[in-house]
Amino acid sequence: AQSVTQLDSHVSVSEGTPVLLRCNYSSSYSPSLFWYVQHPNKGLQLLLKYTSAATLVKGINGFEAEFKKSETSFHLTKPSAHMSDAAEYFCVVSDGPGRRALTFGSGTRLQVQP
Amino acid sequence: SQTIHQWPVTLVQPVGSPLSLECTVEGTSNPNLYWYRQAAGRGLQLLFYSVGIGQISSEVPQNLSASRPQDRQFILSSKKLLLSDSGFYLCAWSRQGASEQYFGPGTRLTVT
């Protein structure tokens, strides 16, 4: 069975400071991992994905994540937060293609203070 | 490029009334299709998925049903809504054999 734990339900940062959203996973197989972002009353947008290639994955809007197998982590980072980054972020794991293979974390709400 | 549409955007329905939410995908063929529900302050719950026309798998027993009458059309229905059916409903698609899913804009359903 696979599972995802997002370690912080809320994170607050000041504009221009770094962002760190933490995620730990468990999976019986070599997983694919994703980060999605959801702005209020909107659908989810794929930020980035890890699929067993490079362990440092670059995504859209300046976000990146590092896959650390030894720590079973896939933390999301951004060097400098922007007001538009305020949203809910979901860490997601898949251990197989297609069908019902995605397991979502409970989400981290990112606040960006001016 | 591929796009996914959902309608209506918002819906307010009384308890006991029927429901029909529609999702369509453009720019791809034979996608896997998914319905999720997101309750307030909670994560996403997979309700149904489909790997082809007329092929529906249910993840959670409930009073909702899904149908796929065409390759790129996915419909979520109910004969009688419950208060607990309120939530944000998201449709998603993925390519056959791929893990990443792409989400629609969602429908906000309020059952009163």
Image (cartoon, rainbow, N blue to C red):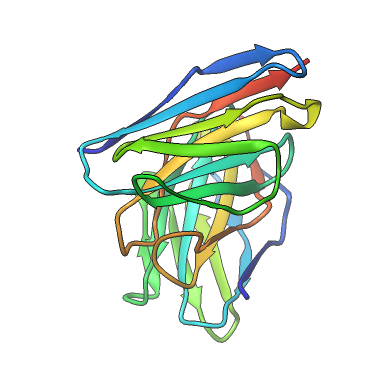
Relative to residue A47, is residue B111 drawn left or right? Answer: right
Residue A44 position in % (x across, y down): 49, 40
Residue A103 x/y as whole percent: 58, 60
Q: Nearer the viewer, residue B100 or A11?
A: B100
**Visible in this render: residue A111?**
no
Residue A50 location in percent, x, y? Answer: 40, 67
Number of marks drawn: 0
Image quarter (top left, top right, bottom left or bottom right) of the N terminus of chain A: bottom right
Residue drawn at x 58%, y 78% is A72
Q: Residue at image x 51%, y 25%?
A: B21
Please name whichever residue, A72 or A102, is drawn nearer the observer in this view of the structure. Answer: A102
Identity of the residue drawn at 56% across and 86% down: A70
In the image, taking residue A12 as reference, residue B108 lies left or right, namely left
In the foreground, B109 or A63? B109
Specify whether residue B100 is in view.
Answer: yes
Whether A87 is drawn above or below A75: the answer is above
User: Where residue B39 sits: x, y (%)?
Assistant: 71, 37
Left or right, A49 with respect to B26, comes to: right
